[in-house]
């Protein structure tokens, strides 16, 4: 299986990057392929008005590496690990732009939309958040946003790890040991059982022993 870890912080040696590296190590330990990328290397522009900046063939007109990130790495991956610092109680700007710009490539006007629309659903998604505040509510809005994003894209949000820290490397001292938790999430990325019951969902009373 192929995992893709996206580092969404402009600080390459920051706390969310440490969480990302721990998760990637866990994925490798479980015997899966994993690629680790920095969004800064691909995403430079924000989503614009597609009616004014598309090329004549419908392709995106923003001249950066986003299309390569999407088509060569994100779409082919079986699972995504998204690592972001908490910025104003939300995701980093690079990660938000990455999500926003899916709009252009999912539009039927884009020449490559069929492959993107076929490749986005079914992925497993894990989220890693570096946050200065230990107050639990600080990250709940962002966690809810990821839940809705994955629901919309028909993906499974398999886990969230929050590491508390501010200065570089501070997350290592979090007594909750988020680095261990991120590594464990990476190891179990393709094995975690996800349930989303409705009142009429057929299910066994034994959650973990059911097939």
Image (cartoon, grey):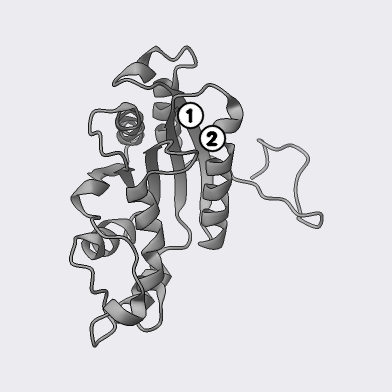
Is residue 1 visible in the rendered structure shown here? no
Q: Is disc 1 surrounded by few (<14), some (14 to 19) or many (20+) residues within 10 Å?
A: many
Kindly identify which numbered label has been placed on residue 162: 1
Is 13 drawn above or below residue 167 in the view shown? below
Residue 206's x, y, as percent?
Answer: 74, 37
Is 176 drawn above or below residue 105 in the view shown? above
Is 103 drawn above or below residue 188 in the view shown? below
Q: Are marks 2 and 1 in contact (CB under 8 Å)?
A: yes
Quick one: SS at disc 2?
helix
Q: Nearer the viewer, residue 102 or 180?
A: 102
Query: Horizontally, is 54 left or right of 96 in the view?
Result: left
Query: Horizontally, is 34 left or right of 144 in the view?
Result: left
Q: Quadrant of residue 97?
A: bottom left
Q: Which residue is mark 2?
A: 139
Q: Quadrant of the C terminus?
A: top right
Q: Which dot, 2 or 1, sits closer to the camera?
A: 2
Residue at image point 39% right, 43% down: 81
Q: Nearer the viewer, residue 95 or 45?
A: 45
Q: Is disc 2 surrounded by few (<14), some (14 to 19) or many (20+) residues within 10 Å?
A: many
């Amino acid at each position: 299986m192929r995992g893709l870890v996206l580092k969404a912080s402009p600080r390459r040696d920051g706390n969310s990057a440490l969480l990302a590296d721990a998760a990637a190590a866990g994925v490798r330990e479980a015997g899966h392929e994993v690629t680790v990328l920095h969004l800064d290397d691909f995403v430079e522009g924000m989503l614009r008005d597609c009616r004014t900046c598309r090329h004549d063939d419908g392709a995106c007109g923003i001249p950066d590496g986003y299309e390569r990130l999407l088509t060569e790495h994100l779409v082919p991956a079986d699972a995504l690990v998204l690592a972001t610092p908490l910025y104003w109680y939300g995701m980093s700007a690079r990660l938000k732009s990455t999500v926003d710009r899916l709009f252009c490539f999912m539009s039927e006007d884009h020449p490559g939309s069929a492959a993107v629309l076929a490749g986005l659903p079914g992925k497993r998604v894990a989220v890693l958040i570096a946050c200065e505040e230990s107050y639990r509510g600080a990250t709940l809005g962002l966690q809810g946003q990821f839940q809705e994003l994955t629901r919309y894209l028909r993906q499974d949000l398999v886990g969230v790890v929050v590491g508390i820290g501010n200065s570089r490397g501070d997350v290592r001292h979090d007594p909750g040991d988020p680095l261990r938790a991120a590594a464990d999430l990476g190891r179990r990325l393709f094995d975690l059982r996800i349930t989303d019951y409705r009142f009429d969902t057929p299910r066994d009373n034994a959650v973990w022993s059911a097939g």
